[in-house]
Amino acid sequence: MRNLTKRLKEAKNTILEDLYDAARSRSFVRRLQLSSQQERILRQLQENGVALVKDFYPREQCEFLKEKLEGYLKEAQGDKDFESGAYLRYYDFMDYDQGVRRIHHVEKEIPELVEFRHNKFVLDIASAYFGKPMFSQILISQHNVVTNGTNRYHHVDQFGKQFKSFLYLEDVDLNKGPFTYILGSHRNHYIRLKKQIIGNKIGSPTSFYEEDVKNILNRETAFCGSAGSLLLADVRGIHRGMPQKTSSRSILMNYIYPTPGDRFPDK
């Protein structure tokens, strides 16, 4: 009963925050003075919850980053804390997403990524989308090795506000684990709030089962892209990463929240 009361209170706060943001977003957007490209991306996000920006980052720089980052993995062969403050974690112990390797706060090892982490073009879009200033709290490089379909099923990252950008460091097709998103699910408030209140008997409370999404699964879209493509997503919408079928895949993930500061998961 105590857990249900807590979840009800959290769901109430989610609703109030969503209503508050909707009321103030238009005036906030005007103050930001977005470019025509940013406005197009913002409309896509509002409609679908996700938007793909092609050729955002130079291919040659992506190739350099991919080689450098995968070099850290080959050298470490396991968890490692770097003197810079970055840290590498292997996630082979998990029931899902086995074969994931992440370097947290990767810009501490590769300083030129500081600008990418705090990119004004992206943060202004995220701020306009939520109607309040948004900030990067952690930049992570993620490498997925070939798996046997153990990727996590559909889920949301959290029920409150969170925005992510994903930079593909190599060409990603259907065989290389593209990000998939159920278009418009960020606006399926009933499904999301029901999950937040009821929760799951086992597993993560933010995971959705086939029964939960069967009526909207026809809207699931896989976002393939070339190296340098940037994916922006409201990760309150229902999404997943497809399994790696033919080869590994490297990306950068920027976690964007409505408060400044750094996060240190799995530290």
Image (spheres, helix red, strand yellow):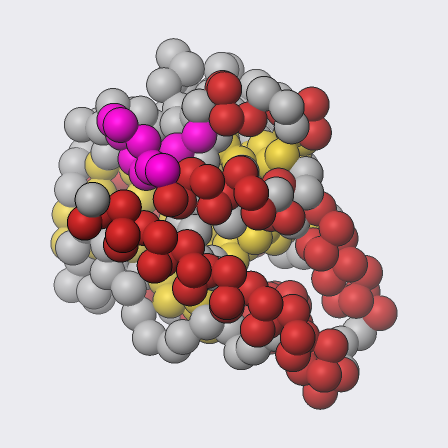
Q: Main secondary structure of the magenta part?
A: loop
Q: Is residue 203 magenta?
A: yes
Residue at 56%, 43% in the rendered image: 190
- Which residues fall within the magenta stretch? 198-208
- Is residue 74 among what the camera can see? no
Image position of 211 with respect to 167: above or below: above
User: Residue 97: which quarter of the image?
Assistant: top left
Counting every numbered tag in the picture gives: 0
Identify the residue shown where x is 40% and y is 24%: 151
Horizontal relation, residue 261 to residue 46: left or right: left
Is residue 239 positioned above or below 5 on the image? above
Query: Which of the 4 image quarters holds residue 85?
Result: bottom left
The percent coordinates of residue 91 (x first, y second) are 24, 34
The quadrant of the image that shows the N terminus is top left
Direction top: furthest residue: 148
Expressed as whole percent of the image width and height from the top left, the position of residue 92 reads 22, 27
